[in-house]
Every structure is written in structure tokens, then in C-alpha cells.
Amino acid sequence: MRILISCANGSGTSLMMMRSTEKAMKELNIPITKIHHCSISEGKSSAGQYDVVFTPTNFLGMFDQAVKKGVTVVGIKNVMSHKEIGEKFAETELYQNMKK
């Protein structure tokens, strides 16, 4: 699974969310082949190279083009919550298809 974590500046919040995402994916037994955290501006331009993008909910609209290209984009309210990240990802079509 190629995962992109994107937030406003791409430093503190996205790094914390990346750690939470790693924990959530481990609990879901989802192997990570690539994971990267970055700013929204970088994320918008590189999202197409990933299977899933995790971003705070207030930035979801920034990834409309990625969604049109088939990338799964997941909005997260509490970036520190691996539980929320895991639950939101488990609701996605991508996850459902992986578990078939």
C-alpha cells in the first residue's frame, strides 16, 4: 500500500498522523510499501502516485483531482488517533476490495 499523509505545512501534524497511520495499518494487517508525509501543495501534485491519501477533514476538497483519478482520500478529524484512521480506512471501498 502506498500512503500519502498531507497537511497544511507537511511537518509536525503530518508526521504525527503518519505515525498514527503506521500503527493503524499494522493493526489492520495492511502492508505499507511506501509512506510519505508532506504539505498540501506537494500532496496535491503527487497524490496520484499513491493508493490512499490521509488528510485533516478541512483539506479534503484540495484532493478532488486525486479522487477523480481513483485515489482513495480519507479525511481525519483527530490526526493523533490511530483508531479513527483505522476505522475510516476500513470503511473505504479500497479496504473492502483488499479483504475480498
Image (cartoon, helix red, strand yellow):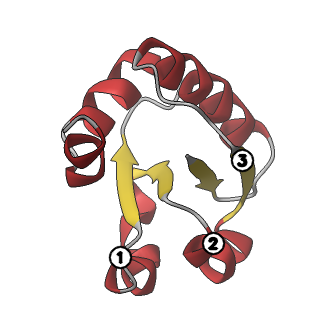
Disc 1 to disc 2, C-alpha distance = 11 Å
Q: Residue 3: x and y, percent?
A: 59, 49
Q: Name the residue under label 1.
A: 70
* Horizontal side of residue 100 vs 36, given as left or right: left
Q: Of residues 96 and 79, which is closer to you in this image?
A: 96
What is the crowding at mark 1: few (fewer than 14 residues within 10 Å), some, or many (at least 20)?
Answer: few
Disc 3 to disc 1, C-alpha distance = 18 Å
Point out the tag, 1 or 2, that comes first from the N-terminus. Answer: 2
Point out the tag, 2 or 3, that comes first from the N-terminus. Answer: 3
Point out the tag, 3 or 1, that comes first from the N-terminus. Answer: 3
Above or below, 27 relative to 88: above
CB within 8 Å, label 1 to label 2 = no
Location of residue 100 (image quadrant): top left
Q: Which residue lies furthest to the top in this view?
A: 27
Q: Type of residue at label 1?
A: Gly
Q: Type of residue at label 3?
A: Lys
Residue 80's tag is none
Q: Residue 60: x and y, percent?
A: 38, 65
Disc 2 to disc 3, C-alpha distance = 10 Å
CB within 8 Å, label 2 to label 3 = no
Determine the secondary structure under disc 2.
helix
Determine the secondary structure under disc 3.
strand
Q: In percent of the image, x 20 and y 52: which residue is there?
A: 93
Q: Residue 57: x and y, percent?
A: 36, 52
Q: Residue 67: x and y, percent?
A: 35, 76
Q: Name the residue under label 2.
A: 49
Q: Mark 3 points at which residue?
A: 34
Q: In percent of the image, x 73 and y 49: which residue is there?
A: 37
Q: Of residues 64 and 30, which is closer to you in this image?
A: 30
Residue 81 visible in this rendered orientation of the protein = no
Residue 42 visible in this rendered orientation of the protein = yes
